[in-house]
Amino acid sequence: MDTEFPNEYPQMTRDPWTTLRICQVYDNPWIEVTHRDVLNPSGGNGIYGVVRFKHVAVGIVPVDAEGYTWLVGQFRYTLGRYSWEIPEGGAPLNTPPLESAKRELLEETGIQAKKWMQLLELHLSNSVTTEYGVAYVAQDLEFHSAQPEETEELQLRRIPLETAFEMVLRGEITDALSVAALLKTKELLRLGNLSV
């Protein structure tokens, strides 16, 4: 039995879904929720709920010359629990994500960086949402006062990068953008494509 993966995966060029009707259920400045009557790929009747995000998620792994990073802790209303995450926020769709990432890093941590590198792009929950995220590594750091929004009650922790990686592996960091960005950072360091 051949267990090797092909070098190229086939890309489907035709959308196998047929949308029959779209009904807006909810709308606010951040998301729109629609109910859709559809024909599924087999031709059967079905329904789909779609959450359209009106911002791009941006996340930042700030790294200083000693190999430390910063995590932001906050209570997440939707989960009903406390969460440790990389600094992150939302970028309006008409704004370059890097510009918003710089703003979010300053607001949440008081850090400005002279050196930026894009880590990854990802869809955070593509089965029901359009949410899209971009993560960066920020280096050559300068420190100022944090400027959190009135909706944010944040706690900051400066920790070794290795500790952040261990928190991911122990399940102490569960935010999808944070997990992906920290693991990509770890891999780039291992490969020598990122240095501290």
Image (cartoon, rainbow, N blue to C red):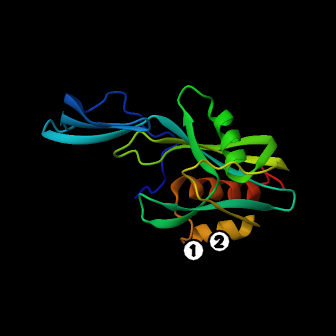
Disc 2 from disc 1: Cα separation: 6 Å
Left or right of 180? Residue 43 is left
As drawn, 141 above or below 21: below
Amino acid type, mark 2: Glu
The quarter of the image holding the C terminus is bottom right
Q: Which residue is denoted by mark 2 in the rendering?
A: 166
Left or right of 39? Residue 3 is right
As drawn, 75 above or below 19: below
Characterize the local packing of mark 1: few (<14), some (14-19) or many (20 or more) Cα atoms within 10 angstroms. few
Residue found farthest to the front: 150
Q: Which residue is drawn at the image coordinates 74% and 60% (left, top)?
A: 69
Amino acid type, mark 1: Arg
Q: Are marks 2 and 1 in contact (CB under 8 Å)?
A: yes
Left or right of 46? Residue 62 is right
Q: Which residue is denoted by mark 1 in the rendering?
A: 170
Q: Which residue is drawn at the image coordinates 18% and 34% (left, top)?
A: 38
Task: Identify which residue, 44 or 105, lies in the foreground.
Answer: 105
* Spot occupied by residue 28 in the image (x, y as percentages of width and height): 38, 36
Task: Identify which residue, 189 or 54, lies in the foreground.
Answer: 54
